[in-house]
Image (tube, rainbow, N blue to C red):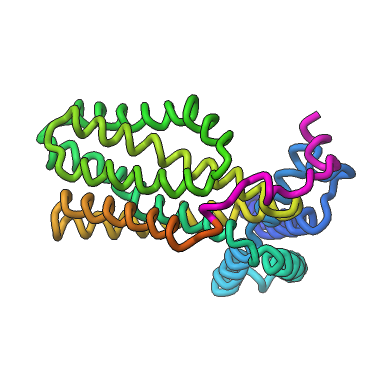
Amino acid sequence: MLGFVETVDFVYEEDGALAELANAANAVRPLGRKGYSTLPTFAFGWPTSENAPLLFTGSVLDVLRRAALGHYRTRNGRISLVFKAITWALLGLLQAEARAQFQASRGQPRLQDLFILSIIVTMLGFSILNMMAAIADKMMGGDASTLGTLMAASGGGAFTTALVILPLAQSRKHIGRIMAGVVVWMGCWYIVLSFAHWLPLAMLSLFAFSLGAPLVVAMSLGLIQVLVPFEMRARLVGLFNMVSFGLQPFSFLLVGASAERFGLEKVILVNGSLLVLGGMAMLLLRRGLRQWEVHEAAAPPAPASHYDNWLR
């Protein structure tokens, strides 16, 4: 039994550190001849290459925990610590490269607009959807069946956008006006929802709101990849997901506490009003967003060296 425990400890410490090193090394220079042409090389490179600071923080915390437990007093522990140190050096190199690339992209105001619009929708829009159970209970006076009906209405709006509205919106000329206008649209329907105590009206409000939310998020994800250089696309998408969806827990906590103190209807009304003001502010204050035509800001075609081979 003691030998088994020692074997498990060896695999957990040394091989775990070696896996981190392989991940970081593959992120710096893909281990496969054709980059991400195989699933193993994709797995041993993607997490680190997209979020080196997070991986570095987790690795350092893991070392501190193991040091407090005395794991590095053994030979295997010291070997794993050497692997960790090499990994940190590679992560530092990745972060330096990423910082230089981000500096080159900071001068793109439309990229900033996409982030702002997505944050507005996440903070003010999705947070209310998280209160669906409270809406069904407090405002509608219903039960689980009422909750299912409201969620079905919201899902139906998102489904309609994915099939019909999104393809039509992508073909429009001034996409910035559409996205900011959609934010105003969403806010108007939240204002209607704040006064809705009749189930069909609440269903209509949630259906109409959900027509817009997927459009803003999906189009932002796509346009970010058009605006930035090929080698920056994955990193910017990762940053977009981290900034927009990473704010959801905080917005959920804030909305929940506010609804408990001030009332659910008032919180929905305030969020809807802020969505309207936010969308109008983007239209009025960001002149470039109103005049933005996507084909003018499109990046050159991406080289076919990595992903074409991977998709084959």
x then y, percent, for residue 131? 25, 45
Q: Nearer the viewer, residue 18 or 152?
A: 152
x then y, percent, for residue 133? 22, 39
Furthest residue in direction left, as rendered: 141
The residue drawn where x is 49% and y is 30% is 162
Query: Total marks drawn?
Result: 0
Does 11 appear above or below 70? above
Q: Nearer the viewer, residue 303 or 34?
A: 303
Does 161 appear above or below 224? above
User: Would residue 285 appear left or right of 194 to someone viewing this image?
Assistant: right
The residue segment tinted magenta is 289-312
Furthest residue in direction right, as rendered: 33
The residue drawn where x is 37% and y is 36% is 210
x then y, percent, for residue 104? 71, 66
x then y, percent, for residue 96? 73, 70
In which quadrant of the rendered view does residue 278 lie? bottom left
The residue drawn where x is 30% and y is 57% is 274
In which quadrant of the rendered view does residue 139 lie? top left
Q: Nearer the viewer, residue 216 or 123?
A: 216
Asked whether residue 152 appears in the rendered view, the answer is yes
Q: Was residue 235 drawn as part of the magenta stretch in this picture?
A: no
Asked whether residue 79 appears in the rendered view, the answer is no
In which quadrant of the rendered view does residue 280 lie? bottom left
Q: Was residue 302 drawn as part of the magenta stretch in this picture?
A: yes
Q: Locate the C terminus and report the quarter of the image it occupies.
A: top right
The residue drawn where x is 55% and y is 69% is 65
User: Would residue 9 appear left or right of 158 to someone viewing this image?
Assistant: right
